[in-house]
Amino acid sequence: MFSDLLANRVLWIAVASWAAAQILKALFDAIRHKEFSFERLFGAGGMPSSHSSTVCGLCTGMARIYGLDSPLFTLSLVVACIVMYDATGVRRAAGEHAKLLNQLLFSDPDRLTPSQKMLKEFLGHTPLEVLAGAVLGIVIGLLMPV
């Protein structure tokens, strides 16, 4: 059973798409801030979107193996659309809200309680970050052997 999981080509396309996006995200962030942040290897938000890369890699793998007319491709396409829409909508708005709340909470240090911590601001993506992730996932899905 475990060997079947290891032999799952679509899974490895999705994993490779996620890993490539996370590595690129960490590299772009390091170049931009002139220091490497280990958190960016696993964190959400940033360029390119690893969520978009993962689901588009998955979708491309499904299309290549099962065909564009298969229910598996259809399911992966719908999930990819939902994930990418959510990344630029709800999750991006939540990140913007976190920025504002952090500014309000931490503008007066005297009012802070010891348990208060910064809210995570890197949650969603700009449309360009989602597009870059999608293209990355599709390219990896097309280049990896099936």
Image (cartoon, helix red, strand yellow):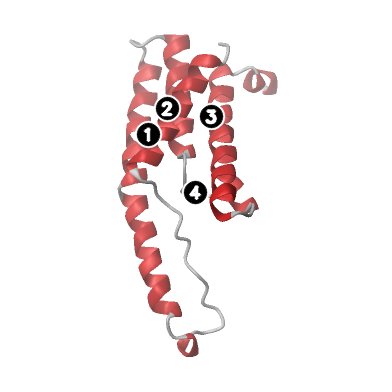
Residue beneath the point at 56% across and 24% down = 11
Closer mark to the observer between disc 1 and disc 4: 1
Residue 91 spot, x, y in % from top left = 37, 51
Give the labeled residue for mark 3. 17
Tell me if residue 90 comes above or below residue 113 in the rendering. Answer: above
The Cα–Cα distance between marks 3 and 1, rounded to whole angstroms, is 14 Å
Give the labeled residue for mark 1. 131
Task: Say whether marks 1 and 2 touch (CB < 8 Å).
Answer: yes
**For marks 3 and 2 on the same chain, the one whose residue lies earlier in the sequence:** 3
**For marks 4 and 3 on the same chain, the one whose residue lies earlier in the sequence:** 3
Q: Is residue 42 visible?
A: no
- Of the 4 image quadrants, the one containing the N terminus is top right
Residue 87 spot, x, y in % from top left = 37, 44
Question: Closest to the observer: 45 or 59?
Answer: 45
Helix or strand or loop: what does disc 2 sit on? helix
Give the labeled residue for mark 2. 135
Tell me if residue 26 comes above or below residue 106 in the rendering. Answer: above
Q: Amino acid at mark 1?
A: Leu
The label number, if any, that marks residue 109 in the structure image:
none
The Cα–Cα distance between marks 4 and 2, rounded to whole angstroms, is 18 Å
Q: Amino acid at mark 2?
A: Val
Left or right relative to 88: residue 110: right
Task: Say whether marks 4 and 2 touch (CB < 8 Å).
Answer: no
Task: Say whether marks 4 and 3 touch (CB < 8 Å).
Answer: no
Helix or strand or loop: what does disc 3 sit on? helix
Q: Amino acid at mark 4?
A: Ala
The Cα–Cα distance between marks 1 and 4, rounded to whole angstroms, is 15 Å
The label number, if any, that marks residue 44 in the structure image:
4
Q: Is residue 8 visible?
A: yes
